[in-house]
Image: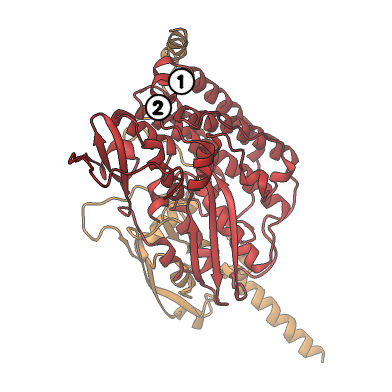
Amino acid sequence: MEGTAAPMSAEPQTGVVDMMLNMGPQHPATHGVFRMVLSIDGERVVGVRPHIGYLHRGSEKLSEHESYGQVITLFDRLDYVSNLNNELVFARAAEELMGVEAPERAQYIRTILCELNRVASHLLFIGTYALDVGAMTPVMYTFRERERVQNLFEHVTGARMMHNYFRIGGVKEDVPGDFAERVRSVVRHLREGVEETDRLLTFNEVYLARTRGVGVISAADAVSCGLTGPCLRGSGVAYDVRKAYPYEVYDRLEFDVPVGEFGDCWDRYWVRLQECYESLRMTEQALEQMPDGLVMAPGRRIARPPKGEAYAHAENPRGDIGVFLVSDGTDKPYRVKVRPPSFCNLVGLERMMDGAYVADAVAILGSLDIVLGEVDR
Amino acid sequence: MISGLLGLLTTLRWLFRKPVTAHYPKQHLPVQERYMGFPALLWDDTAAEPFCTGCMVCVRECPTQCMSAQMHDNPKFASGESHRRKIIQTFEINLNRCILCGICVDVCAFDAIEMSYEHELSSFSRTGARADLGLLLELGGRYTETTQWQATNPEKNVASVALAKRAAAKTQAGEAEGKA
C-alpha cells in the first residue's frame, strides 16, 4: 500500500489508541455474515479491517469433485441474487475449453435472462440500500417488481432462484411458447416500477444527505483497488465487460454505459438505477432479434473437455466475474478459480471509509452491494 | 421538500390499490407449469410396475448424492408382461439433501423420474424426509394426474408399446424366414 493509500491507524504516535468497534458478523446491514472491525477516532472511522469467511462453503474445491454439468449447480449458489449470470460465466469458460459455441437462439435466451436477472439484482440492491440508509418504503416497491422477474424465471427454468438452466453449449430446454409476450409484459411493468422507485428515492433530500459525498473514491483509486462494475463506473470510469470484451450477443445490442461523476454512494446507486433502464432496453432489443433454431449445440451430453485451461469473464450485476478453468481431460475440472467481483470490490472499502462518520459506515458498505456467498465462496 | 411530497404522492397512489401480497399458509399461489419440486418416480400403468429399471444413472449424476437405489430381476419379464429385464427394488431419496436441480430427470433414459410439483413435505418424524419407493411413486402418481403426463419415448419405455413393437418385429422376422 503505497502512493495514494491512506495511512492506517496502526501505530499510535502520541500514546492515543483508537477505539475498536466490531460490526458483524450478524448485523442487518452487512447483508449476510460479514464482519468488519472499525478503528474509530471520535466519530470518524480511521481504519477498517474486513473479516470474511463466515459463509465459506468450499465451492471451488467442491467443483473439483463434480462433473462439469454438476458444477453449474454450485455456481448458482455463489452470487445468489444473480444466479443466471454466474451460470453463464461458467458455461462460457467450459465452452471455450471444449471449443463449442452455443447456438444463436440459446445465446439470445441467455442474454435476455441475464439482463432480467441484472434488473432483479439491482432492484434488490436499491430496496435494501434504501433500507440501510433509513428509507423503509422503497424495498416494498422493488421487491414487488423483483417478484415479476422471479415468476418469469420460474416459468422458464422451473425454479425461482437456483435455476440450473444454462448448459455447456446452450440452455436446458427451449423457452415456453409465450416467452416473448411474458417478457414484454414483465419489461413494461418493470420499467414502470423502476421509474416509480426513481421518483420515490433518487432526489429525496434525506436520501441525498445520507449518500451524496459519502464514501468517495477517486477514479484512480478505484482502478488501483481493482474495483469493477457499478462501483468502478460510479467513479466515472466507463469500463464494462459487455462493451470492452463483448460476449454472447452484446455486440449486436445498443446500450449505453452509465457512469457517475464523484464516486460517492449516490453515484454508485445512480449507476445501478440507470443500468436497470439499459438492461430493459437490451432485453427488448434481444427479444426483437431472437431467431428460431436449436438451443443446444449438438454433441455429447457429458462434457469431457480436452486438456487445457480457459478463462472467461462477464459483467455480473456486481462487476467483472471471471472463471479460470483447468481441465486434465477427465469429466471433472482439475481446478476452478473464481474471481468474484464482490470480493475484489471489498478492497476499496478501506479507502471509501477513511475519514467517514461511523454512521455512514453502513451506507458505504451497502453501496458496494456485496453478496457474501460470492465473497467467501 | 418537493421530492418528499412527490414520494408521498407515489405511495398515496398505492394506498387505494389491491395488495399484491399473498398470505402464504392460508393462501397458496399456483406453481408454474415447469416448476421443479421434489423428484418423483412414475408408474407404468400398462405393465403395473414403475418405469424405473434401477440403472443408477441418476444416483451417479446427482450432485449431492441424495439418492440410493437397488434393482432386481423383473419377474414380469419372464412371464412376458413387461419388456424390462430389471426393475427397481428399493429407491430412497433424502429430500433434505436434494437441491431440486433436475439433473436426474435430464439423465434418465427411461422416462422414470420427473420433478413433481410437491414442495410441502415437512413432517414431524425424524425420518420424514427420506422418501422411499412407495412415497416417490405416490408423488409421481399425483404429478401424472395433474399434468396428463406422457412418456417422451413411449416406443422404448411404455411396456405395452414396446412389447407390441417387439412382437411385430418378431412376426416380421418370422415371415421373412418363412419366405426364405
Residue A130's tag is 2
Q: Residue at x 41, y 66 (%)?
A: A62
Task: Tell me the kind of residue under disc 1.
Answer: Leu
Instruction: Return the chain for callout 2.
Output: A
Furthest residue in direction front, as rendered: A14
Image coords of residue B50 (percent x, y): 46, 67
Q: How is the image coloured?
A: by chain
Instruction: Indicate left or right for A1 with B178 as reference.
Output: left
Furthest residue in direction left, as rendered: A15
Q: Nearer the viewer, residue A72 or A347?
A: A347
**Which chain is painted in orange?**
B
Furthest residue in direction right, as rendered: B180
**Counting residues from the N terminus, which is met first, the one under dot 1 or under dot 2?**
2
Task: Tell me the kind of residue under disc 2.
Answer: Ala
Q: Are marks 1 and 2 in contact (CB under 8 Å)?
A: yes
Image coords of residue B179 (percent x, y): 82, 89
Q: Nearer the viewer, residue A109 or A359?
A: A359
Quarter where residue A250 is shown: top right
* Element carrying mark 1: helix
Where is A166 relative to A274, above or below? below
Instruction: Indicate left or right for A3 with B168 as reference.
Output: left
**Which chain is painted in red?**
A
Q: Nearer the viewer, residue A153 or A346?
A: A346
**Which residue lies under the disc numbered 1?**
A201
How packed mark 1 is, by other alpha carbons closer than 10 Å (few <14, some 14-19, many 20 or more), is many
Image coords of residue A256 (percent x, y): 66, 34
